[in-house]
Image (cartoon, helix red, strand yellow):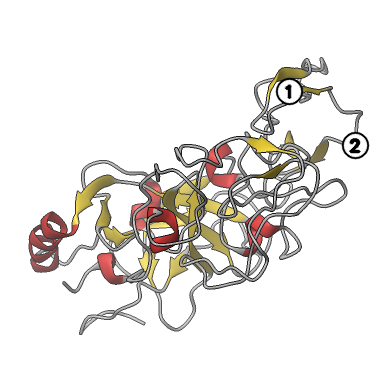
């Protein structure tokens, strides 16, 4: 179907289904190995426990999501399962480069597994080491991590656990995470405005300054099967609208009836200022927009739909 469903065309990305079997995840009996996906914390394989000294996923392994090399750091807190991926990044690293094994394979850090990077700290809740806007500090985190040992994460000192800056270009003064690879899970994004577009109908505009490479928003919608999406796609094409976005081999998002403002972002083949990335978040494939250049307040947002229709403005 000629609709937004084809924009990502992730024909090689399979749906995650937790594996459950005896023995290591090394052959086709493991659904994760079979689909070239990492095992998640929901898997029932024999490598469920996270312990020190495990092998971890080898760096040479590839991800069907990105096709890039990735894997776990073989450090204290490794896994019995070689299909698992997590990071052991520490400050000043922010999990925003290929040095982070999670970032390298288009995967957000898992707050239950990536314990050293700060993925579990939430900047607005006032717990787990964050600083409230009133200046009070949240408490430390105590519990049992996936590594099998009791963990205590004390509240960080100022400037260590948090980076005091705006969400994108400095327009929002809240404490932000030191781990920058959790944007979809936390949902911190710049303000987006809806208004008439010179390109087509309604459009989305930046409501504040946005830095280059900053997270702009997530495309959300109703989860459809490919069959249902094709049926709806023919209706949408006849009405000259496009709200379908394919995420895996069999899953399509439909933002027509439930979604957010990102569904009004218009197409541009000549000058898009957003990049679309499919990111794995604890096994779910989600759609994220990132700025390809610095954006000014009032600037309209565009991305390439991945297809064109006769009569569209480029």
Q: Nearer the viewer, mark 2 or mark 1?
A: 1
Quadrant of the rendering where the N terminus is positioned: bottom left
x, y percentage for residue 273?
Answer: 53, 70
Depth check, front residue: 234 or 143: 143
Q: Could you say which is closer to the camera, residue 166 or residue 151? A: 151
Q: Is mark 2 on a helix, strand or loop?
A: loop
- Asked if 83 appears above or below 90 in the picture, the reply is below
Task: Sort mark 2 into few (<14), some (14-19) or many (20+) by Cα contacts within 10 Å.
Answer: few
Label number found at residue 128 = 1
Is residue 248 rendered to the left or right of residue 171? left
Residue 227: name its quadrant: bottom left
Q: Earlier in the sequence, mark 2 or mark 1?
A: 1
Q: Where residue 68 appears, x then y in whole percent?
A: 58, 72
- Is residue 264 or residue 41 the one in the foreground? 41
The residue positioned 62% from the left and 62% from the top of the image is 295
Is 173 positioned to the left or the right of 1 in the image? right
The residue that appears at 76% across and 45% down in the rendered structure is: 53
Residue annotated with mark 2: 159
Please say if 69 is above or below 126. below
Which of the image's four quarters has the C terminus? bottom left
Label 2 – label 1 distance at C-alpha:
15 Å
């Amino acid at each position: 179907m000629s609709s937004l469903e084809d924009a990502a065309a992730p024909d090689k990305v399979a749906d995650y289904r937790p594996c459950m079997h005896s023995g290591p995840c090394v052959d086709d009996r493991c659904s994760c190995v079979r689909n070239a996906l990492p095992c998640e914390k929901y898997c029932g394989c024999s490598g469920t426990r996270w312990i020190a000294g495990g092998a971890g996923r080898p760096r040479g392994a590839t991800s069907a999501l990105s096709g890039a090399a990735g894997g776990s750091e073989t450090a204290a807190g490794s896994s019995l399962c070689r299909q698992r991926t997590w990071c052991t990044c520490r400050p000043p690293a922010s999990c925003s480069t290929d040095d982070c094994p999670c970032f390298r394979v288009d995967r957000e850090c898992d707050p239950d597994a990536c314990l050293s990077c700060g993925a579990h700290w939430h900047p607005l809740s006032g717990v787990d080491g964050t600083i409230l806007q009133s200046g009070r500090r949240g408490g430390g985190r105590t519990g049992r991590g996936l590594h099998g040992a009791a963990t205590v994460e004390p509240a960080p000192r100022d400037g260590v656990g948090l980076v005091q800056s705006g969400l994108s270009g400095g327009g929002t003064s809240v404490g932000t995470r030191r781990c920058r690879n959790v944007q979809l899970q936390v949902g911190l994004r710049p303000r987006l405005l809806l208004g008439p577009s010179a390109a087509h109908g309604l459009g989305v505009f930046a409501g504040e300054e946005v830095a280059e490479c900053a997270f702009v928003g997530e495309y959300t919608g109703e989860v459809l099967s490919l069959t249902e999406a094709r049926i709806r796609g023919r209706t949408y094409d006849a009405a000259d609208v496009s709200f379908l976005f394919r995420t895996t081999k069999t899953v399509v998002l439909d933002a027509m009836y439930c979604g957010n403002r990102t569904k009004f972002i218009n197409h541009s083949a000549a000058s898009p200022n957003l990049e679309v990335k499919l990111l794995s978040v604890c096994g779910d494939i989600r759609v994220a927009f990132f700025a390809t250049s610095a954006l000014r307040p009032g600037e309209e947002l565009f991305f390439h739909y991945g297809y064109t229709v006769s009569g569209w403005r480029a």
